[in-house]
């Protein structure tokens, strides 16, 4: 399958923070008629939204199969998942949705030969990773969410090598965006802070000032996703999840940068249980392999990301 317009795409978990942006990008690139968005939510929630929509619980393998078969789907972007903070509240559900959902997609890919994009996360790393996470750093996560992402990477490797499934993945850092609020992750503070600043409200940040985590503006994450899916299969040495180059700044540095642009904005730091998850993750990621194998580079730095977030949310 090449760059041409012959892709017929299904997105799972499409109504989430990444899905709504990826949907736009895929519609623009391949035509709205070739992209089906799906999510567990009722279709009435998204009626008349200008995209094709199917209600799909990823645990319902039969329904997933009928959508894939009836629409000749040849590429699935599998985004449905429970994220870190939500997953810690209900570890069993996190395991079920993240693992059984992925297994359903993988088994159908074996049968129908479609390609898969399945994101991993910096949550695969644990406290032993040190400050900079390399591609081959140890994977000893401290959360159930991270455990599902490590297992998902292993499943990707297995289905690729044992069954020839063309699956690709990225270890997304915390993603900063303005179209949809994030869905229960530990890096959500880096989005919430902009909403409060633009609304001229104070923010109470749930991690401490010194917390430094790998982050990225959403447009860069979408660019990385499209670029990875366009790369020739033989150029890829990783299937489960490529590290990406990322921005890294402390929560306090982010606050100060926003204050440069919105003077008078106030933020206090009141860490809660999510501090522990943040502390178990690296400060930075080494994305050299993504640059070498499929040419990825970041476009946004902290300053330009803050500008675009503030401008977009002010509209
Ligand atoms: N946003 C980030 O910062 C980030 C960072 C690293 C990795 N990721 C990964 O990217 C993917 C998408 O993340 P996101 O931020 O868009 O998450 P999100 O929580 O915003 O969206 C997930 C979507 O999945 C849907 N969903 C939940 N259970 C479902 C089910 N059983 N069947 C179908 N849909 C279901 C939800 O309704 C939601 O719309 C996930 O795999 C996540 O782990 C995200």
Image (cartoon, grey):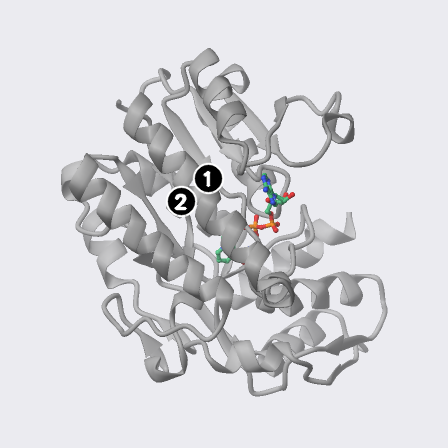
**Residue 198 position in % (x across, y down):** 79, 62
Which residue is rendered at x = 64% and y = 36% of the image?
40
Report crowding for label 1: few under 14, some 14 to 19, many 20 or more residues within 10 A (C-alpha): many
Residue 224 versus residue 171: which sits nearer the camera? 171
**Quarter of the view holding residue 125:** bottom left
Residue found farthest to the left: 234
**Residue 155 position in % (x across, y down):** 30, 49
Q: Secondary structure at mark 1?
A: strand
Q: Secondary structure at mark 2?
A: loop
CB at disc 2 and ligand 1 closer than 8 Å: yes
Residue 123, compared with residue 16, is above or below; it is below
**Residue 183 position in % (x across, y down):** 65, 55
Is residue 50 something one can see in this rendering? yes
Residue 103, compared with residue 36, is above or below; it is below
In what quadrant of the picture does the N terminus appear? top left
Q: Is residue 131 left or right of residue 13?
A: left
Look at mark 2 in the image and give the residue it sits on.
Answer: 118
Is residue 130 something one can see in this rendering? no
Q: Is residue 266 left or right of residue 139?
A: right
**Quarter of the view holding residue 259:** bottom right
For the residues labelled 1 and 2, say whether their Cβ atoms are less than 8 Å apart: yes
Mark pair 1, 2: CA separation:
5 Å
CB at disc 1 and ligand 1 closer than 8 Å: yes
Look at mark 1 in the image and give the residue it sits on.
Answer: 78
**Quarter of the view holding residue 271:** bottom right
Report crowding for label 2: few under 14, some 14 to 19, many 20 or more residues within 10 A (C-alpha): many
């Amino acid at each position: 399958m090449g760059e041409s317009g012959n892709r017929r795409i299904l997105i799972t978990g499409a109504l989430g923070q990444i899905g709504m942006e990826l949907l736009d990008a895929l519609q623009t690139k391949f035509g709205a008629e070739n992209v089906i968005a799906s999510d567990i939510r009722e279709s009435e929630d998204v009626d008349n939204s200008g995209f094709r929509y199917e209600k799909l619980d990823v645990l319902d393998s039969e329904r997933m199969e009928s959508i894939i078969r009836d629409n000749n789907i040849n590429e699935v972007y599998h985004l449905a998942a429970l994220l870190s903070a939500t997953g810690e509240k209900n570890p069993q559900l996190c395991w079920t949705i993240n693992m059984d959902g992925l297994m359903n997609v993988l088994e159908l890919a074996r049968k129908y030969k479609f390609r898969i994009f399945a994101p991993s996360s910096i949550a695969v790393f644990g406290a032993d990773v040190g400050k900079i996470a390399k591609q081959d750093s140890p994977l000893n996560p401290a959360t159930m969410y991270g455990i599902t992402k490590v297992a998902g990477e292993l499943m990707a490797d297995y289905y690729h090598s044992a069954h020839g499934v063309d699956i690709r993945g990225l270890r997304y850092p915390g993603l900063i965006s303005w179209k949809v609020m994030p869905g229960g992750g530990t890096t959500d503070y880096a989005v919430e802070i902009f909403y409060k600043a633009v609304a001229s409200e104070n923010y109470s940040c749930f991690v401490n000032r010194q917390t430094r985590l790998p982050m990225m503006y959403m447009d860069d994450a979408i660019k990385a996703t499209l670029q990875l899916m366009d790369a020739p299969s033989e150029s890829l040495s990783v299937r489960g999840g490529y590290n990406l180059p990322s921005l890294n700044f402390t929560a306090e540095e982010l606050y100060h940068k926003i204050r440069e642009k919105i003077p008078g904005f106030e933020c206090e730091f009141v860490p809660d249980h999510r501090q522990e998850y943040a502390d178990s993750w690296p400060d930075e990621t080494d994305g050299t392999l993504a640059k070498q194998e499929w040419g990825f580079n970041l476009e946004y730095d902290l300053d330009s990301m803050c500008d675009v977030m503030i401008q977009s949310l002010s509209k």
